[in-house]
Amino acid sequence: MKKFLTGLSLNTRSLIAYLVVIGSFTFLFRLAEKEVPPANKDVLNTAAGLILGTLATVVGFYFGSSKNETDANNAVNAVATASTITNSSTTTTTTTQAPI
């Protein structure tokens, strides 16, 4: 069941990303072929900013810092694992001084 839910999660993310990208380009192409009435120009600019901002977020997630963060986490885990192995194989001796 866990494997199914993990696959579903990955598919859902991909599906949402595809819908955002397709919707953004559809919006831009429709916007290019129609004339905008002057009264609706501000509303259209706000909507365009929202849609293009969402597109930038999706692209950034798939190709940007998310990948770099995963690589950094893997590097930190590798160093931590190597450090743990080294520390567990080394014996340490602790000495205490008697009170004077």
Image (cartoon, grey):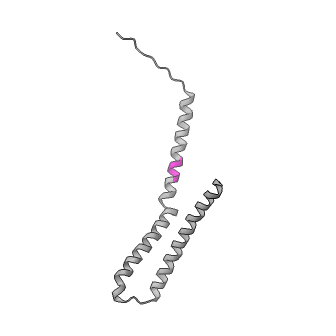
Residue 92 in the image: x percent, y percent?
Answer: 51, 23
Residue 51 in the image: x percent, y percent?
Answer: 44, 74
Residue 71 is one of the magenta-drawn residues: yes
Left or right: 80 as drawn, with respect to 41: right
Left or right: 3 as drawn, with respect to 58: right
Residue 52 in the image: x percent, y percent?
Answer: 44, 73
Q: Is residue 77 above or below residue 92?
A: below
Q: Quadrant of residue 19?
A: bottom right
Q: Nearer the viewer, residue 65 or 98?
A: 98
Residue at 39 percent of width and 11 percent of height: 98
Magenta stretch bounds = 70-74
Residue 94 in the image: x percent, y percent?
Answer: 47, 20
Q: Nearer the viewer, residue 3 or 100?
A: 3
Tell me the chief SS of the magenta region: helix
Q: Is residue 96 above or below residue 79?
A: above
Q: Quadrant of residue 96?
A: top left
